[in-house]
């Protein structure tokens, strides 16, 4: 039976800018490896599952796109009489996807119910072929992220090409020095063609292009098989020994008679091969005596595949979705949300997809690709879910999280909280980050007149500085540090200190005593342990064991009792009310040290104000952590409360106005984001339809405060629930994992989430040593 939709569908091939979702469903983690496979829409290239959830059919009905390409992938069974050879460090050959899998495709019409349309039809064949050849969404985003790291160089910018000439097509077919017909590199200066170096993945090469560069001194070459009609290609500068970007590639190729629009990409780029190689790293999951740790499977025990430096994301996501508020909020199923046309670009949909993937147990099963035999003693771990759509979505537009570099896991947590808080919540569903919010109260008392000022600040986490005390060590040994208790760190956080401020009430410069305590406690307390030492003026992370009781403990002693009846408040005159705290006077000695190191005065004052005005080291750590802040060089009103003043700060308004963002919308953006300029800009772009009008409820009751976050009820007992651990000398490098308390059978045990590997652990000593972010639940 002929399908009428083939001729009327007006199909077109995916362009390089199109996302082709041909690995997993955009609304759940069902994939091409499932028995029924995945249906890829031939109109918009959305991926939809076919099983009990029927996301492909629901998409087809909602969008009116009936034609799909069904893709099913199965693991090839390879019989071996002998164990496979171990790959040596210098091995070149590597197993490809075609070696491992068999892929079957069929074209279907979901409206007509036809399951095997003629894929040779002229309207279908080129589209199907392009879909299968296109980079998958995850690989496309990985490549894009890696390519963002590349720049041009002086050798490309100053390239002087020899007189133009037409290189005949037959001369582009093989290396000029040997018979190799792939991995060919064209010298952009003289047009010589040579083979490249041998590459991982079985790509041959005799380095004749490199030899040409060394002999003649021509540094810049392009890989012929990587050139696309859109102007992207592998460009390598042998002089710099780096992969580069050539913005004038079309012009440089035309000098040799090569027209971009006539080229087709026929080989993997260096970036694509590098990504494949990065993903081959494996981590040993054994005890000290060499025994394999026991893999765990079931609901809440699903791993996340490492996308290449994404362990920071996996560890934070595992801890977040262990929090009951997140489970209740997003574990409500994966039914399509009304009005969402592109599920891959919708934060609510992707958070529900993650929740379903991690919590349902649907995908928590041994990797069928790993065969256990006498030759292979490896325990079959999970394949792991691939959170590509989620990573791309939360990193979109962010200077760091959009890249493939390792990131600070705690910074990602703060970024996620910000995104979730700002997102539109469906009717009746609350913000799950509220369970992490609480209020800290600061008490300032003038040392001269004894008047006080209390101010409060809502937060979703606290920082604790871990005291560093080196233990005696033998010469040449790595330094070791004395263990400290969590109580010591909390005592330091809440201790009374003296700060140099001028009193607005009596004008005394004697200073103030300052103490910070909890006004309320959250349901989940997030603690970031800062274990930083400054070595040669460079902050370096060190490993200090923080001893935390695994049994419940009380935080009652850290609750503020509020203002005493006999304490006299500072007068609420106009000057004081505008600043909300006494005028700030920076520590003169610390300020001089920082300025002597070359930091601008504005940055120095901000850093001292933010770090307690105590010493140059603390201020410098703050500076290194905030170098990229968009308002780092904007003079701040350091006598004001950032939460209230930020909404009307003229300097911040001026910054927005200079970018063309002005009027009531700019004022509201600063108010909604607590005076944070960067977040205000994001808010404006994510709320294009908001005219800046004050909400009706707010206008009707301007004096009514919103409900205070957290609870002051006692007892306030907390228990350690999960930890993000980090190994490495920098929070932007190394490796992150998560340890979470889970109910296994009839007992509670610690479970290690190391990317896709999920195992039960007995020894938690390393967990204490490398802990970076703690999640405590109120019990």
Image: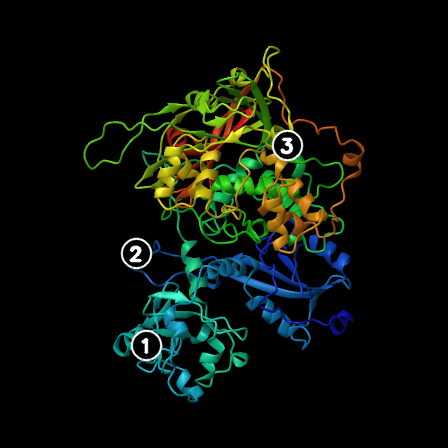
**Which is closer to the viewer, label 2 or label 3?**
3
User: How busy is the neighbourhood of tag 1: few (under 14 within 10 Å), some, or many (20 plus)?
Assistant: many
Sequence-wise first label, 1 or 2: 2
Q: Residue at x 74, y 28 (%)?
A: 704
Query: Horizontal and vertical percent for residue 757?
Result: 46, 42
Q: At numbered mark 1, what does the secondary structure look like: helix, strand or loop?
A: loop
How far apart marks 1 and 2 lie (CA) works out to: 31 Å
Q: Position of residue 134 (x, y in %)?
A: 56, 66
- Rendered image coloring scheme: rainbow
The residue identified by callout 3 is 434
- Which residue in the protein does label 2 denote? 89
Near mark 3 (Cα within 10 A), the count class, few <14, some 14-19 or many ≥20, is some
Give me the residue at 64% from left, 43% from top.
670
- Residue 247: x %, y % from top left: 48, 71
Pick out the residue farthest to the top.
566
143 is higher (above) or lower (below) than 537: below
> Element under label 3?
helix
Q: Which mark is nearer the camera, 1 or 2?
A: 1
Q: Nearer the viewer, residue 680 or 633?
A: 633
The residue that mark 1 highlights is: 218
Picture coordinates of residue 343, whole percent (x, y): 67, 52
Q: Residues within 10 Å of mark 2 (few under 14, many from 20)?
A: few
Q: Is residue 488 left or right of residue 711?
A: left
The answer to whether residue 442 is seen in the rendering is yes
Is residue 763 something one can see in this rendering?
Answer: no
Q: Does the CB distance between marks 1 and 3 fall below 8 Å? A: no
Q: Quadrant of the N terminus?
A: bottom right
Real-space CA distance between mark 1 and mark 3, rounded to the nearest whole angstrom: 60 Å
Q: 770 or 292: nearer the eye?
A: 770
Q: Quadrant of residue 10?
A: bottom right
- How many numbered marks have been drawn onto this rendered protein structure? 3
């Amino acid at each position: 039976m002929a399908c009428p939709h083939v001729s009327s569908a007006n199909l077109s091939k995916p362009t390089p800018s199109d996302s082709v979702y041909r690995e997993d469903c955009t609304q759940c983690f069902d994939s091409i490896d499932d028995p029924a496979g995945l249906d890829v829409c031939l109109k918009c290239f959305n991926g939809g599952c076919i099983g009990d959830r029927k996301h492909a059919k629901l998409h087809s009905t909602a969008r009116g796109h009936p034609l799909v390409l069904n893709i099913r992938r199965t693991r090839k069974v390879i019989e071996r009489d002998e164990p496979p050879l171990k790959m040596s460090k210098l091995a070149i050959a590597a197993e490809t996807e075609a070696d491992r899998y068999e892929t079957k495709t069929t074209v279907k019409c979901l409206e007509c119910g036809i399951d095997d349309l003629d894929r040779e039809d002229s309207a279908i064949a080129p589209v199907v072929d392009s879909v299968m050849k296109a980079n998958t969404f995850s690989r496309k985003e990985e490549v894009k992220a890696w390519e963002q790291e590349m720049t041009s160089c002086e050798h490309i910018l100053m390239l002087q090409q020899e007189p133009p000439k037409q290189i005949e097509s037959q001369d582009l077919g093989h290396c000029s020095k040997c018979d190799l017909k792939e991995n060919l590199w064209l010298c952009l200066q003289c047009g010589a063609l040579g083979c490249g170096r041998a590459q991982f993945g079985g790509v041959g090469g005799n380095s004749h292009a490199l030899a040409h560069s060394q002999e003649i001194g021509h540094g810049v070459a392009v890989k012929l098989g990587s050139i696309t009609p859109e102007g992207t290609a592998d460009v390598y500068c042998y002089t710099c020994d780096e992969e580069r970007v050539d913005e004038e590639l079309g012009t440089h190729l035309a000098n040799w008679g090569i027209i971009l629009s006539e080229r087709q990409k026929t080989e993997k780029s260096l970036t694509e091969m590098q990504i494949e190689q990065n993903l081959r790293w494996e981590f040993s999951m054994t005890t000290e005596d060499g025994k394999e740790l026991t893999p765990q499977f079931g609901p809440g025990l699903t791993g996340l595949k490492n996308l290449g430096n994404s362990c920071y994301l996996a560890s934070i996501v595992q801890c977040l979705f262990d929090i009951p508020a997140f489970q209740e909020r997003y574990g409500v199923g994966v039914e399509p949300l009304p009005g969402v046309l592109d599920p891959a670009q919708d934060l609510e949909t992707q958070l529900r997809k993650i929740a379903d993937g991690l919590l349902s147990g649907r995908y928590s099963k041994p990797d069928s690709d790993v065969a256990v035999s006498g030759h292979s003693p490896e325990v079959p771990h999970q394949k792991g879910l691939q959170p590509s759509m989620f990573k791309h979505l939360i990193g979109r537009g962010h200077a760091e999280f959009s890249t493939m570099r390792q990131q600070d896991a705690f910074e990602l947590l703060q970024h996620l909280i910000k995104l979730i808080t700002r997102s539109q919540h469906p009717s009746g569903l609350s913000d799950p980050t509220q369970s992490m919010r609480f209020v800290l109260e600061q008490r300032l008392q003038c040392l001269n007149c004894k008047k006080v000022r209390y101010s409060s600040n809502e937060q979703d986490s606290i920082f604790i500085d871990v005291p560093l005390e080196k233990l005696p060590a033998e010469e040449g040994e790595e330094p070791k540090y004395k263990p400290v208790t969590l109580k010591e760190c909390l005592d330091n956080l809440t201790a009374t200190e003296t700060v140099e401020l001028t009193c607005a009430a009596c004008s005394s410069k004697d200073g103030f005593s300052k103490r910070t305590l909890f006004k309320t406690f959250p349901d989940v307390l997030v603690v970031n342990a800062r274990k930083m030492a400054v070595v040669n003026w460079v902050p370096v992370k060190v490993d200090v064991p923080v001893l935390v009781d695994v049994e419940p403990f009380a935080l009652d002693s850290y609750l503020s009792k509020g203002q005493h009846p006999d304490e006299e408040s500072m007068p609420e005159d106009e000057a004081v009310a505008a600043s909300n705290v006494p005028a700030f006077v920076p520590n003169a000695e610390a300020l001089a040290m920082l300025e002597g190191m070359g930091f601008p005065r504005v940055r120095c004052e901000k850093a001292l104000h933010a770090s307690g005005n105590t010493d140059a080291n603390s201020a410098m750590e703050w500076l290194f952590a905030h170098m990229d802040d968009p308002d780092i060089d904007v003079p701040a009103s350091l006598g004001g409360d950032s939460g209230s003043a930020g909404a009307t700060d003229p300097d911040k308004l001026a910054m927005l106005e200079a970018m063309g963002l002005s009027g009531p919308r700019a004022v509201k953006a600063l108010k909604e984001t607590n005076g944070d300029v960067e977040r205000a800009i994001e808010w404006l772009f994510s709320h294009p339809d908001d005219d800046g009008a004050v909400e009706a409820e707010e206008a009707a009751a301007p004096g009514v405060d919103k409900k205070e976050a957290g609870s002051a009820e006692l007892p306030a007992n907390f228990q350690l629930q999960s930890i993000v651990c980090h190994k490495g000398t920098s929070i932007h490098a190394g490796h992150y994992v998560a340890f979470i308390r889970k109910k296994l059978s009839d007992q509670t045990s610690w479970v290690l989430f190391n990317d896709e590997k999920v195992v039960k652990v007995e020894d938690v000593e390393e967990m204490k040593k490398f802990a970076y972010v703690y999640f405590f639940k109120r019990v």
